[in-house]
């Protein structure tokens, strides 16, 4: 007799959630199990194409049987099957990555979180425990090895044992729970209910889902003449993507997506497209409505599923999507593809390249459409995947500029809302030649920078860049509609009138000595100290010279193999209209160094830098306060 094993702690928690949670649609268990069976059939089909197993491919099927007396519902497939160790790996643990830890202190109230957690794993097999008190799995792997039996009554563990040789495939026996006041589990023993559920969730499954049914013949008097058992196929087997768009409802797409891609939320966008002609294909694409777990990591497997005439060929075919769109999930079915195609061959396949380029345009078009007609939805989408689009825009020196430039949004000084480059350029002032931007940690921080005040007051809009990658994107783009990008805290900012410029020059002359002595005091830190043409009410600011910007300096410093010594050239600018200038001109020569350092430290803090010697800063400031009170 096999020894009873304990589930891992995470699995136990998840099972507990499954069994006791208010997870609304218990009925989805059937869809999950059928989907697993269908996957197993795909796998054996595939193995047979590669001559790894010998089967009659026309006999692949899923079979459902009901035993009312025993209260069991059984789902059998003649798919790939599992060996004992595969069962152990697949059904004995849920959190396969092992890195996942449950949120601590999950409480009854956190039902929404339950669903999140459940959704992250795509419950699959475990959903059986929503309706069954005991689950048995019998399996024979196509790889040979012994037939095995797995049994579990939920939370307190499972056992696996060897059993007498069985045909290749898997049988899952659900011992349904007893009915409760508000839960009717016996429903799942009724033929009509099973038929409904299959129609609802699994109609498109490519293999026949069969069940035996009693059918009676009647004589003239309407009495039963003969009753016989007939085998009926419950699903139409037409893949969803082959069906007419006009016949399909949102919920058809949504449930297909949720089932196929194990998502607990409906997609935010469905793209169903067909092409006929020299190149033919059907594509069914989905934009998830939330960021999938691990999306922004190496672990995430992007790519579309590939089918040929409804037959599954490959999962995660990456070459079908540009990296910027790796959040898109879905499938492509093309009669032009060979069933025997391998991952390596894919990269060179001309058909595939042609499909990829079509899809790219289609996805872009749909997203642009969303941006134009449903701003709110687009911004929600962008919150999730905007970063990916920006990475894509930056990659390969902006090779995808044309594809992506109109999909990107940045924060803006206009009401701190998001703006596209197109919108920005459309409302540029007549005399404006460049697209202004500034980087910062948040929109609010950008907006509070001393340099923005004057630019805004002059009526110019400023892009507020808050992601590390943003400046790199602009750099990769170079221009947008022939307009260059210009950081308002870098180099010269030529916005004043001729009179203003002349006045600034005059003031510079008048304060030459002061500026020289400040410059001398800060000669190791800054490359220049000058009067500013970009400040209104604030006394000082730091700007960088052309070349490396502050933001890039920070990003580079963070990179593991980055360049900590790459520094932006710093220029300290003083507001010529500020009373500070006069105050400074009165400072005695021996204090100038302290003042200069204080000004510089302040300017650094404003730009979000940390001070090398904050204690010195604090002490100098304290001394200044003492002096001032004398
Ligand atoms: P998922 O299907 O999301 O991977 P499941 O918990 O439903 O998660 O299943 C875990 C794994 O168990 C599957 O990936 C598959 O390898 C295996 N499995 C489940 N059901 C079957 C089946 N009927 N035949 C063969 N393997 C199966």
Image (cartoon, rainbow, N blue to C red):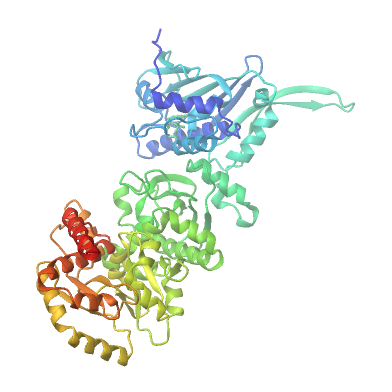
Q: In the picture shown, does residue 502 fall above or below 80?
A: below
The residue at the point 66 percent across, 18 percent down is 68
**Percent position of residue 162, x then y:** 40, 14
Question: Residue placed farthest to the front in the image?
Answer: 630
The residue at the point 50 percent across, 17 percent down is 153
Ligand 1: give its quadrant: top left
Can residue 281 be seen here? The reply is: no
Q: Where is the C terminus found, in terms of image quarters?
A: bottom left
Q: In the picture shown, does residue 340 fall above or below 544?
A: above
Q: Is residue 453 left or right of residue 594?
A: right
Q: In the picture shown, does residue 343 fall above or below 188?
A: below
The residue at the point 28 percent across, 80 percent down is 493
Q: Nearer the viewer, residue 398 or 421?
A: 421
Q: Is residue 249 left or right of residue 567?
A: right
Q: Quadrant of residue 606?
A: bottom left
The residue at the point 90 percent across, 26 percent down is 221
Question: Residue placed farthest to the right in the image?
Answer: 221
Can residue 42 be seen here? The reply is: yes
**Percent position of residue 241, x then y:** 54, 51
Q: Where is the N terminus found, in terms of image quarters?
A: top left
**Percent position of residue 160, x then y:** 41, 16
How many labels, in total?
0
**Percent position of residue 578, x then y:** 29, 77
């Amino acid at each position: 007799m096999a020894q009873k094993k304990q589930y891992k702690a995470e699995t136990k928690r998840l099972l507990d959630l499954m069994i006791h949670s208010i997870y609304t649609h218990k009925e989805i268990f059937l869809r999950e199990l059928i989907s697993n069976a269908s996957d197993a059939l795909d796998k054996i089909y595939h193995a047979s194409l590669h001559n790894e197993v010998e089967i009659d491919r026309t006999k692949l099927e899923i079979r459902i049987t009901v035993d009312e007396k025993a209260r069991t519902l059984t789902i059998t497939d003649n798919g790939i099957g599992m060996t004992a160790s595969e069962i152990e790996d697949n059904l004995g643990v849920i959190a396969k990555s092992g890195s996942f830890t449950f949120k601590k202190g999950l409480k009854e109230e956190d039902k929404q979180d339950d669903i999140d957690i459940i959704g992250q794993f795509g419950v699959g097999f475990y959903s059986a425990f929503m309706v069954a008190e005991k689950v048995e799995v019998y399996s024979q792997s196509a790889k040979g090895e012994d037939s095995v039996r797995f049994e579990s009554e939920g939370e307190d563990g499972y056992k696996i044992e060897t059993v007498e040789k069985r045909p290749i495939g898997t049988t899952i026996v659900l011992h349904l729970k007893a009915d409760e006041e508000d839960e009717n589990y016996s429903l799942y023993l009724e033929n009509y209910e099973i038929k409904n559920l299959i129609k609802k969730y699994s109609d498109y499954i490519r293999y026949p889902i069969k069940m035996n049914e009693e059918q009676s013949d009647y004589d003239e008097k309407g009495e039963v003449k003969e009753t016989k058992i007939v085998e009926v196929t419950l699903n139409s087997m037409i893949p969803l993507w082959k069906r007419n768009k006009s016949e399909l409802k949102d919920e058809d797409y949504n449930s297909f997506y949720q089932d196929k891609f194990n998502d607990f939320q409906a997609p935010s966008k469905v793209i169903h497209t067909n092409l006929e002609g020299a190149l033919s294909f059907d594509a069914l694409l989905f934009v998830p409505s939330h960021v999938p777990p691990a999306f922004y990591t190496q672990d995430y497997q992007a790519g579309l599923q590939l089918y040929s005439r409804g037959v599954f060929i490959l999962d995660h075919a990456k070459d079908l999507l540009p990296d910027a769109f790796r959040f898109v999930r879905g499938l492509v079915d093309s009669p032009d593809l060979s069933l025997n195609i391998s991952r390596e061959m894919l990269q060179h396949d001309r058909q595939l390249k042609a499909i990829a380029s079509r899809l790219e345009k289609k996805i872009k078009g749909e997203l642009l459409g969303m941006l134009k007609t449903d701003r709110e939805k687009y911004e929600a989408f962008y919150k999730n995947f905007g970063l990916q689009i920006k990475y894509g825009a930056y990659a390969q020196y902006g090779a995808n500029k044309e594809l992506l430039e109109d999909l990107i949004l940045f924060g803006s000084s206009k009401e701190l809302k998001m703006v596209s480059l197109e919108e920005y350029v459309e409302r540029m002032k007549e005399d404006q030649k460049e697209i202004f931007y500034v980087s910062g940690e948040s929109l609010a921080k950008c907006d509070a920078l001393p340099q923005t005040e004057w630019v805004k007051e002059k009526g110019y809009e400023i892009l507020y860049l808050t992601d590390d990658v943003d400046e790199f994107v602009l750099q990769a783009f170079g221009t947008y509609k022939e307009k260059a990008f210009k950081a308002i805290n870098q180099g010269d900012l030529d916005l004043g009138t001729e009179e203003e410029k002349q006045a600034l020059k005059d003031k510079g002359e008048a304060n030459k000595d002061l500026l020289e002595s400040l410059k001398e005091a800060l000669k190791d830190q800054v490359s220049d100290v000058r009067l500013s043409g970009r400040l209104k009410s604030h006394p000082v600011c730091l700007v960088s010279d052309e070349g490396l910007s502050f933001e890039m300096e920070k990003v580079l410093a963070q990179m593991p193999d980055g360049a900590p010594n790459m520094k932006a050239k710093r220029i300290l600018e003083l507001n010529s209209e500020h009373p500070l200038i006069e105050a400074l001109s009165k400072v005695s020569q021996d204090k100038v160094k302290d003042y200069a350092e204080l000004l510089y430290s302040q300017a650094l803090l404003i730009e979000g830098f940390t001070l090398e010697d904050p204690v010195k800063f604090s002490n100098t400031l304290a001394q200044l306060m003492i002096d001032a009170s004398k």
